């Protein structure tokens, strides 16, 4: 209809004797044509790029991690996590969309290696009321900072040794539900409570089906200035483990964690420079105590370059299974765009068995929907 | 167990303050230009906060949780749209836990909705083309006439949310638009002498500006948006600039000028680093002085051009 009007205007414009029009009438006509053109453009543009019907599809993104490793120890030991060789570390597919007017869904399928597919995350989220959100499904539990990351978003190629020893390679990834409350403070402050199945084999996995784990997390973020933020969080999980209880020792597990993160990005140079310093402590208290921490520094020194260092220590301080491990890591990353990176990492693992020197080279790529990463 | 719970309760209570109750409408905008225009329309009836500072590159903002706090208390969220904020805004909207500002709600305004877009991708687009915005170039605020349209969209929204004060918003709108129209004709006069001047820009940030003031952008220093140029592209660009005698490279001041300087050296051109948003320099205090600054800088460079 609008295009007809436009035509009529144009035709009348063309076929009228020039002298019959004053300059102001021309201007008025031009203005009207311009306005009509303007009104038309949105209806055209919204269908050209991806198509309206397709916007009902979930946002799909795919991620691949290809890994080459060298280890100076245990080349013939197939139980070793890192030994000399090449492998597909993981292929991940994420689908996310608003389900309807009140729910949002997020599903991540992971193929570790090239064969078995696993539901890494599948959850829905929504608002109960202002400030209080809920989450139901299977998800990476918010215990500390690192545990919430998918492997493609890890700051280093591998886990800090403390996370790997306490939760296993998959991290604390549980089925459950919970709520998260944004506190009415001047700074960002959040409290999370979750009821989890408690199936993590190293920490929980109690004998009864009703042996749930209860997670609480409280975290805060302050803007120290325009360029710097400080995040301080604490996490706690209580659950039951699979150790046969005795009259003295119950099969209870208490997990405690604390994390502190500083991020600095110089104003107006966000694309070129970033400095992140993150430290996390965690401890598992049950019949045996497991403790450890890591601290890492990430420095983006040019648009496409990062250099990073990390230390992680882990210990079982008492009892017959005493362990003491120290892991030193250095990493250099080339990040040509948000969608690909090549990272080279060196690890020195200091432990009771022979020390290990590991070199890892990873290609990390993403396709599809634009990833919006957490802070 | 109980001990841990009570420690937790105390820890949490330590952080609970009380939110102050305010009469004004809380407006949060992504960019400072939108905040500047919203301030003009809302006057003392609204409180405006911009998330991105004018000297920051809005493509590369990190979704800081502190932004969620600002958005949590907002009655209205205004954003630039056309995927400028795609890397971070959705995370913030979800994290803000504020039902009023979600997509499809009354407190959610895409300022690009009535803008006629430039560089809308026709045909096939993909990531091999760099950081492209398929729905159109999002830097539309640099055409001052789009300021009139943005102001109208904001006025419509404010009157919808706060119908009682509609007449006040209306008079603010008229005042703003009149002043802007006056300014526009002054800017046009200033730039009139430079119609058809060929320039090069670093990023496709100046498309709307150049088109409005009849400057011809012959090429960009970036071969593909968001990706540093290759030496091959730079030598092609140098040849092109020498052939066309292009003497000016326009660049927003949040981009590093290493590449532009390299080209400038070989072509005898000048790199002009300009604020692209309100607050980009201390002179660019609002939407008017942003253009004042840009046009004054350009005028200074272009008038001395051989």
Image: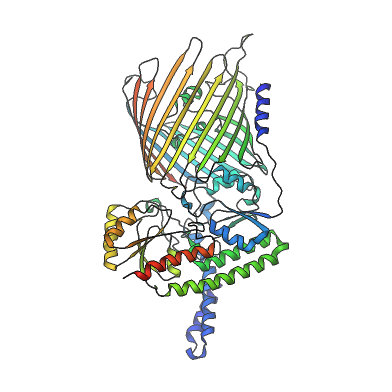
The quarter of the picture where residue A353 lies is top left
Note whether A282 is above or below B78 in the view shown. above
* Colouring scheme, one of rainbow, by chain, secondary structure, one colour: rainbow
Q: Is residue A325 above or below residue B33?
A: above
Q: Quadrant of the N terminus of chain B?
A: top right
Q: From what the image shows, is residue B215 above or below residue A184?
A: below
Q: Nearer the viewer, residue A348 or A164?
A: A348
Q: Residue at x 51, y 71 (%)?
A: B184
Residue B91 is left or right of residue A325, and the answer is right
The image shows residue A369 at horizontal and vertical percentages of 47, 47
A8 vs B232, left or right, is right
Q: Nearer the viewer, residue A274 or A248?
A: A274
Left or right placement of residue B88 versus residue A157 in this view: right
Q: State the residue at coordinates (55%, 26%).
A: A257
Comparing B277 with B204, the one in front is B277
* Figure quadrant of residue A336: top left
Q: Position of residue B270 (x, y in %)?
A: 34, 62
Percent x, y of residue B65:
56, 42
Q: Position of residue A294 (x, y in %)?
A: 47, 27
In the displayed structure image, the side of residue B193 where residue B107 appears, left or right: right
Residue A59 visible at all:
yes
Corner quadrant of residue B257: bottom left
């Amino acid at each position: 209809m609008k295009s007809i009007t436009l035509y009529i205007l144009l035709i009348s414009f063309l076929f009228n004797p020039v002298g019959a029009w004053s300059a102001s009438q021309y201007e008025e006509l031009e203005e009207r044509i311009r306005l009509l053109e303007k009104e038309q453009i949105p209806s055209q543009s919204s269908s050209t790029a991806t198509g309206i019907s397709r916007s009902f599809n979930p946002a799909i993104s795919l991620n691949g991690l290809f890994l080459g490793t060298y280890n100076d120890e245990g080349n013939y030991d197939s139980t070793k996590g890192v030994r000399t060789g090449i492998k597909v570390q993981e292929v991940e597919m994420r689908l996310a969309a608003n389900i309807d007017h009140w729910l949002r869904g997020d599903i991540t399928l992971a193929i570790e290696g090239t064969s078995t597919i696993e539901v890494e995350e599948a959850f829905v989220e929504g608002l109960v009321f202002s400030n209080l959100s809920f989450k139901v499904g299977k998800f990476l539990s918010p215990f500390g900072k690192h545990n919430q990351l998918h492997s493609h978003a890890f700051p280093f190629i591998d886990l800090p040794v403390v996370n790997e020893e306490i939760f296993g390679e998959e991290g604390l990834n549980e089925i459950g539900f919970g709520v998260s409350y944004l506190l009415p403070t001047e700074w960002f402050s959040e409290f999370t409570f979750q009821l989890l199945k408690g199936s993590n084999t190293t920490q929980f996995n109690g004998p009864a089906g009703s042996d749930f784990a209860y997670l609480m997390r409280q975290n805060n973020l302050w803007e120290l200035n325009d360029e710097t933020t400080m995040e301080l969080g604490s996490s706690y999980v209580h659950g039951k483990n699979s150790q046969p209880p005795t009259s003295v020792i119950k099969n209870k597990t208490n997990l405690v964690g604390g994390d502190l993160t500083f991020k600095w990005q110089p104003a107006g140079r966000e694309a070129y420079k970033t400095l992140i310093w993150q430290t996390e402590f965690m401890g598992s208290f049950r019949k045996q105590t497991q403790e450890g921490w890591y601290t890492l520094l990430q420095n983006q020194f040019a648009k496409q370059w990062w250099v990073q260092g990390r230390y992680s220590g882990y210990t079982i301080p008492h009892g017959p299974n005493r362990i003491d491990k120290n892991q030193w890591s250095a990493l250099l990353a080339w990040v040509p765009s948000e969608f690909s990176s090549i990272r080279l990492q060196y690890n020195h693992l200091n432990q009771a068995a022979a020390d290990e020197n590991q070199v890892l080279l990873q290609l990390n790529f993403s396709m599809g929907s634009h990833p919006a990463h957490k802070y | 167990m109980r001990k841990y719970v009570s420690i937790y309760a105390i820890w949490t209570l330590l952080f609970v303050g009380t939110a102050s109750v305010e009469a004004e409408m809380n407006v949060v905008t992504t960019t400072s230009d939108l905040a500047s225009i919203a301030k003009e329309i809302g006057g003392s009836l609204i409180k405006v906060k911009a998330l991105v500072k004018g000297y920051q590159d809005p493509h590369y903002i990190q979704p800081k949780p502190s932004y969620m706090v600002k958005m949590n208390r907002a009655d209205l969220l205004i954003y630039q749209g056309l995927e400028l904020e795609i890397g971070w805004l959705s995370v913030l909207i979800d994290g803000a836990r504020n039902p009023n500002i979600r997509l499809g709600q009354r407190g959610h305004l895409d300022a690009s909705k009535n803008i006629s877009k430039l560089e809308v991708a026709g045909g096939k687009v993909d990531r091999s083309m760099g950081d492209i915005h398929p729905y159109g170039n999002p830097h539309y605020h640099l055409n001052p006439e789009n300021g009139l349209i943005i102001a109208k969209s904001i006025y419509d929204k404010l009157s919808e949310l706060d119908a009682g004060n509609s007449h006040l918003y209306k008079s603010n709108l008229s005042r703003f638009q009149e002043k802007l129209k006056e300014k526009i004709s002054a800017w046009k006069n200033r730039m009139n002498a430079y119609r058809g001047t060929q320039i090069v820009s670093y990023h496709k940030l100046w498309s709307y500006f150049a088109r409005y003031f009849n400057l011809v952008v012959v090429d960009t220093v970036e071969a593909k948006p968001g990706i540093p140029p290759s030496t091959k592209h730079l030598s092609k660009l140098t040849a092109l600039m020498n052939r066309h005698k292009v003497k000016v490279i326009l660049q927003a001041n949040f981009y590093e000028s290493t590449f532009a300087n390299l080209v400038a050296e070989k072509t005898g051109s000048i790199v002009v680093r300009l604020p692209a948003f309100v607050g980009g320099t201390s002179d660019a205090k609002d939407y008017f002085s942003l253009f004042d600054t840009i046009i004054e800088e350009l005028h200074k460079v272009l008038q001395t051009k051989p």
